[in-house]
Amino acid sequence: MSVTTAKRPNAYVGSPVERVEDLRFLTGRGEYVADLTREGQWHAAVVRSSLAHGRIVSLDVDQALALPGVRAVLTARDIGIVPLIPLRTGLPSYQPYAQPAIADNIVRYVGEPIALVLADTAEIAEDAADKVISEIEPLPLVLGWDQSVNGQILLIGDTTTNVAGRHLASRGDAAAAFAKAPYRRRETFRVHRHMAMPMETRGVLAEWDSATSHLTVHGAAKAPYFNRKSLAKMLNMPEASVDCMECDVGGGFGARGEVYPEDFLIAFAARKFARPIKWIEDRREHFMAMNHAREIDADLEIACTRDGKLLGLRGNAYIDCGAYIRPSCITSVRNIATFMAGAYRIPNFEVYGTAALTNKTPAGGFRGPGRYESCFFFERLMDIVADDLKLDRLEFRRRNLVTADDMPYPLAKLEPSESPDGFLDSGHYPATLDACAHEFGWADKLKLNGTVIDNLHHGIGLCCFVEGGAAGPRENVRLEIESSGDVTLYSGSSAIGQGLETVMSQIAADALEIPMERIRVLHGSTNLLHEGFGSFASRATVVGGNAVLVAAKTLLETVRNAAAERFQVSPEAVLVANGVANASDGRTLSFADLGDLKLKAEGTFANSKATYSYGTAMAHVAVDATTGFTKLLEYQVVDDVGRAINPLTLHGQVIGAAVQGLGGVFSEDLPYDENGQLLVGSFAEYVMPVATDYPNIHATTMEQYPSPNNPLGAKGAGEGGIIPVAGAVGNAVAAALAPLGVTIRHLPLTPARVWELIQAARA
Amino acid sequence: MKLPPFDYRAPTSLQEALALLADHPGDARLLAGGQSLIPILAFRLAQPALLIDLRHVPSLNHIDINDSATTLGAMVRWCEIEKSEPLPQAQPLLYDACLHIAHFQIRNRGTVGGSLAHADPAAELPGVAVCCEARIRLSSGQEIAAAEFFTGALQTTLAPEEMILAVVFPAWPAARKWGFAEFARRPGDLAIAGIALFYDLDMAGRARDAHIAVIGATNLPMRLSSAEARLNGADLNEAALAAVAQAAADSADPPADIHASIAYRKSLVATLVRRALVQAMSR
Ligand SMILES: Cc1cc2nc3c(=O)[nH]c(=O)nc-3n(C[C@H](O)[C@H](O)[C@H](O)COP(=O)(O)OP(=O)(O)OC[C@H]3O[C@@H](n4cnc5c(N)ncnc54)[C@H](O)[C@@H]3O)c2cc1C
């Protein structure tokens, strides 16, 4: 199946190389955390709060303990001082809102852990969890951002507000611009709560080695090194005494691989009882325990000239963060403000992002955090304005998109922020708009826009977007030549199903001028390198990949020196090419010949400047007004990623992300009732797209503007596929239904909701 | 979502299976395809002491077709219905409706008896059985009309020690007109609403003996008699279509849940009746 064998050196990067991981996965040889077992392990089950807000009056664990096979039940009392889960931001306002590792006296969402049952089997643990009797005295609920910010009910003791953070993204002078603007329009929008839903649920297997007082935690993902630091801090242990081990991971999407309460609880139990402890999250608890995302309300006002030159944007976005601030939640708060109009040149800008706490499952990062939502808000607003001012939708955008002449284009200044002010790095954004219009056939399809054919209402829509990537600070790599002459690559990046091993092998093979098959990639686990960062914010390929370049350069230098010593010549007289060191007299030494020397080299790529992939997506829908069902007839996205290391894996990322985004638009939803009860607990209610739902998705990648910020010229590209989906499809549905008097401002566009919007417009 | 503890038996004869049932009154469950029962156990909505697996009980998995009736044994699976060669001719409505059931993997296991006993108001087979006046053959020797068998959402007249042996559909006249239409969030999902209908034509080409049954949009599968009355004797034109659809929506009494409001379901009923009628008229 491999197409790699015939490749010459220096030919992998940019080639559609098939994934080296796939043979392992497709033949069932992947190893996930659930596949691990240890002699004498106990299984854990988490007892969770059934109330959304309340005071724990009593927890009776006697019946649970009495069940044969039950070993122990832990509650907050057994933990002692319950640690908070460290945030990935140091901004002080957020700190008091971090989540305790177990509910301590007060529960704040349905699903919050209140006890941990340990037993001989997972079945017994679950039987016993049912027998832990909790008495919880209800407290008044906060269920929406508006109720949260008014602060009449405070959720966290010792605080005076439910607003954990508020950021302003600004540029120019919005007040002045609006005061004299010839045209203004203000609208409110909403994206609903949904979640990442990786195929593999979470899992932890923790082992305690009493002899060395060492803790090993399997099941890490995304950011193992940071998580090690967090766990060590929470457990009050030296960092060096904790290792986080990465198995194969069945999807992360930003949600998997943060420290959750269970990561601490299982590790704590392993240490306390000096036993391997295993916990595999089931899907029902995944719905209430894993990060939720995306629930944002926005109130935006736009100013422009009547011929469509953007003058200003201002407004507010309120993020429903749920009951606590989880480690990565702040990213969506920052992004919603900074990137509210990411791809456009708007001279005067003033957008606030506000993080509001409620009695729901805590929210966190999910692929394209804040960006997916902002695209829906702003691109809807653009279309509403275009309709109002009778502007051509493409021309309106073309006129205001950031161009090559603007580069580097400063992002709106964010306050407070820990990061330096950013810049869009390179590109000519109208180029993807034009390319997409061409591929999609915008001009032709425009004739169908707003028409009704066979009772189906046709509409087309578009969205322009940017995707931030390559988050710093740095990544580390070590390359080692084995005795066989093969090379082992140790990467600080994490594999979350995205094909990391393939891409790292490609880059290393080109840099070392050896076949890909001779490179083995080990990644993620904290025992491989002294430091690593991981895979989030579309960073692994860019930051990790460039670190490979640095390490490879050093390794080749090391090979040259070693060979020179063997040849007894000066290093300058040795040429290393195609995996062979050549002396000027014709003598040669292969990597294998030097294998006994265990040559190795480390490489670090440090980076403070993000990359920005960008693109345009267009959608053609047909809405059945009698059922409210929307058929996606065509979806086309064109993005420029600077340099595509592997067009095949990139294509997969974009298509998969698009479908994931469509789930958010049309079907996935996490509704709560007025008691703060989550109304979904299985895939019967939470409707995910299936493989056959969206056959008409096309992705085209351009490489016209490499990033100036790294030697590969690559830009992060793991999230771009999802970012424009709601904007493009939302606009298409809106265009289809405009003749019926319907305006689309809220997601999701489930059949029932679309039908109700149509009825309301008719009434 | 681990199963609660239970004993497991896989009897090899009907008598043995029935004896096991009788020995554990109210505390044993029959296991057919497991596609509904296993999730029920995983969610701990039931905790029976004993599962009696019907997989080795002989002669429950036949499809018998003769001049007077079509009989589906309780252990006939959806995939067997789908692959049956004579069934599309013998019972076209039944056959077509069953093609809407679930997804590939589930179709390989789910059974006729399991579906009838589970009595999901959105399930296709119970709806078609009601529509076609099928009879359910029980181990007690009784045969009960489908319309009497289903008493509510997930509720039937089945006694704890009773077992479904088969469902018997009356023979289908070749000239009969029929239609089946449903609306689900995804293909293969349980329907938010569905309509099975048929009628015969009188000498004048008007509908007679109309049968219209609804699934999904009501608490149990049921015929919509006022819509049937509208259809009987009607000239099959646009006005009749609209009147029948409206009568169906008016008489349906749907529940509200997180997928759909009452008004939406009623509207779907009207839409689907119209679609099924258009199908019927085109046959
Ligand atoms: C994802 C998914 C989608 C589905 N979609 C659909 C759909 O679109 N349409 C649809 O109709 N169904 C659907 N189903 C349900 C599926 O068809 C089930 O197979 C069916 O409802 C039950 O049949 P079973 O053989 O699996 O029964 P089981 O799950 O084994 O049993 C169900 C119940 O019937 C009882 N029982 C079984 N056999 C007998 C018998 N002979 N006598 C008395 N009681 C008996 C059992 O004790 C149990 O209470 C879906 C299921 C899933 C998981």
Image: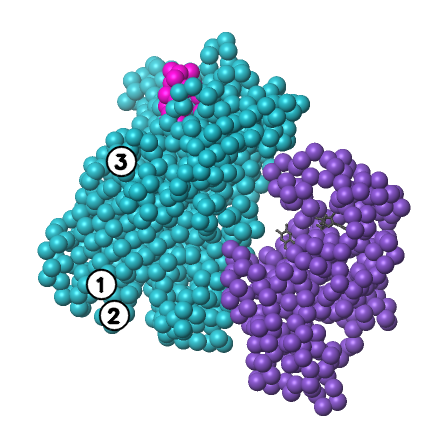
Residue A493 shows up from this direction:
no
Residues marked 1 and 3 touching at CB (< 8 Å)? no
Q: Name the residue under label 2.
A: A388
| Image x and y of residue A119, in percent | 60, 24
Q: Which of marks 1 and 2 is in front?
A: 1
Q: Do labels 1 and 3 share a chain?
A: yes
Report, in whole angstroms, how far the alpha carbon at label 3 lies from the one at label 2: 43 Å
Quarter that holds the C terminus of chain A? bottom left
Question: Under tag 1, what secondary structure?
Answer: strand
Q: Earlier in the sequence, mark 3 or mark 2?
A: 3
Relative to B174, say whether B127 is above or below: above
Query: Is label 3's Cβ within 8 Å of ligand 1?
Result: no
Q: Name the residue under label 3.
A: A160
Relative to B162, say whether A755 is above or below: below
Residue A185 bears which disc, if any? Answer: 1
Question: Under tag 2, what secondary structure?
Answer: helix
Q: What residue type is labelled 2?
A: Asp
The span shown in magenta is A224-246
